[in-house]
Structure formats: structure tokens, C-alpha cells
Amino acid sequence: MSTKPSSLRLGVNVDHVATIRNARGGAHPDPARAAIVAAEAGADGITLHVREDRRHVREEDLARLAKAVALPINLEMACAPEMLDLALAAAPHACCLVPERRDERTTEGGLDAARQHNLIAPYVRRLRDAGIRVSLFIDPDRDQVAAAAGLGAPVVELHVGAYCDAIASGHGAEAERHLSALRRAAEEGDRLGIEVHAGHGITFESVGPIAAIPQLRELNIGHFLIGEAIFSGLAAAVREMRHRMDAARADPT
Ligand code: PXP
């Protein structure tokens, strides 16, 4: 998909452009315009999460975005019949199945791929049958990776929120433990022939050690980039993230 020398793709999540828009209603700022800027600045894909409560992007954003940029679209979605219908109608390049609770501020943990096998399996099957690349958003745990493989998911996205939180709060030893778990989960995915992605909470500070994990093929990053755009502009924020990913990849020490 990417023509860049780095084999690590950057998916830019534009949900929070819509969060700002929705604070006032109307059309500004437009997530589709943000997607165009992100594409020009080096994003390899655009990610968005249509939530049950439509708190940020909505289905019409998905349709406009898909027209506005030539990049692959990755739709994050809950295992819910309404979302399956939406995904099958929109036919994005990829869907990432995520857990969703109305009262959570953001996606707080990964899917329990082992215990929720019967819930998740039909969604993986229906999306795969429609030619959509399916990933499961899971905690960085080898058993979860194995369960995702058992579900026939070709891709997993590892939830790196705990690692990023530990970095942000200066808890170095805890961060190292989370990083080791991430490395083990990425190795397990690779061993099982699954493509491994990572996302949630990634910042300029935390991206390097994550990007240096050689099995990772894609990072999905949203909130920090949109926040940083207030200070430096979205294009500059995306370029800087891209630069840090490539630098970590070139020199993983
Ligand atoms: N990946 C998944 C599966 C997510 O649910 C989210 C949050 O919507 C992200 C990545 C992006 O996280 P953040 O906005 O914290 O960068």
C-alpha cells in the first residue's frame, strides 16, 4: 500500500476533527478536509470510528471521506448489526472491530477475542466475505493474539494505551513491562502469520519504541495529532510523526 521506504504505515484517525465540529454543529472543521491534509503530509491511510452514539464522525463523513482521498479507509466499528450494515454498504478497505461502551470516553481496552468468540466470529466472516480486511483491536497478550488467529482475523491491532499512559506519567519500569508485552504479542502475531498493527494514545514521546518493534506494519494515531494540530498545524504534526516513525525504524536501538 505504501510506496515509502519504511514498511510501517501511518493511519491518521480524524475522529476528533468531527468532535470539534460537533461542539457547535455545522460543517467546520471538516474531517474530510483534514484527511486531505493528512494524505498530503504523508499518511498512508485514514481511520475513523463511527460510534453507536455518533459522538464524532457519522456515516455521511465516511462517504465524503472516501470520495475526498485516494488512501485506504479503515473503519473502526463495534460488533453490532447496525455497524455491519454500514460497513458492508460503505465497503471500506479495512474494518477494525473494537469493543464499545456508551459511557466510555474512548476505547478503553481491547476485545476479549477468546471469551467473545461467538459474538465476533460472524462479523469477521461477513466482512471477510465482502473482501474487507478485518482486524481485531486486542490487548497486547499472546493468548488474545492466538484467539484472533482462531477467529480467522488476518490482522490484529494491539492496544498500546497502557504503554503510552505509563510513558506520559513518567513510570519507566511500568512502561518497560508494557513494551515487553507488546513485543511478545507482535512476535506471536508474526509467528501465526497475522499482520500486526498498534494504536491508541500514541504521542511524539511514545512513538519511537513502538515503531521500532519490527513486526508492526501500521500505527493508527488520532487524538494527539489533532491536538498537536492546534499548535503546529495538522500537516506539520503528521510529518513530524512520520519522521519519528521512520527514524525509529531506521535505527531501532
Ligand atoms: N486504534 C483504535 C482501534 C482506536 O479505537 C483508536 C481510538 O479511536 C485509535 C487507534 C486512535 O487512538 P488515539 O486517538 O488515542 O490516537
Image (cartoon, grey):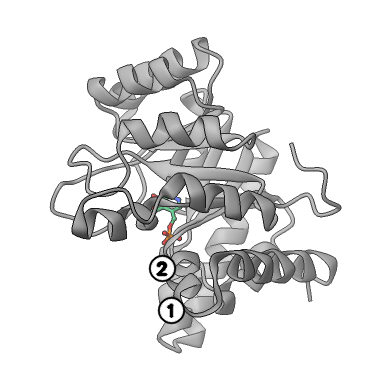
Residue 242 falls in image quadrant:
bottom right
Q: Is residue 34 visible?
A: yes
35, 92: nearer the viewer: 35
187, 164: nearer the viewer: 164
Q: Which residue is mark 2?
A: 162
Badge 1 amino acid: Ala
Badge 2 amino acid: Ala
Label 1 and label 2: CA atoms lie apart by: 6 Å
Report if the beta carbon of the residue with label 1 is closer than 8 angstroms to ligand 1. no
Quadrant of the image containing the N terminus: top right
**Within-10-Å neighbours for mark 2: few <14, some 14–19, many 20+:** many
Q: 50 left or right of 90?
A: left
Reply above or below: 155 against 17.
Answer: above
The residue sitting at 42% across, 43% down in the picture is 48
Q: 249 left or right of 38?
A: right
Q: Is residue 218 visible?
A: no
State the image coordinates of residue 36 (x, y, percent, origin top left).
58, 48
The residue sitting at 21% across, 59% down in the picture is 23
Element type at mark 2: helix
Reply above or below: 114 against 34.
Answer: above
State the image coordinates of residue 73 (x, y, percent, origin top left).
54, 35
Q: Which residue is mark 1?
A: 166
Circles 1 and 2, Cβ within 8 Å, touching? The answer is yes
Mark carried by residue 210 = none
The residue sitting at 53% across, 30% down in the picture is 67
Residue 247 falls in image quadrant:
bottom right
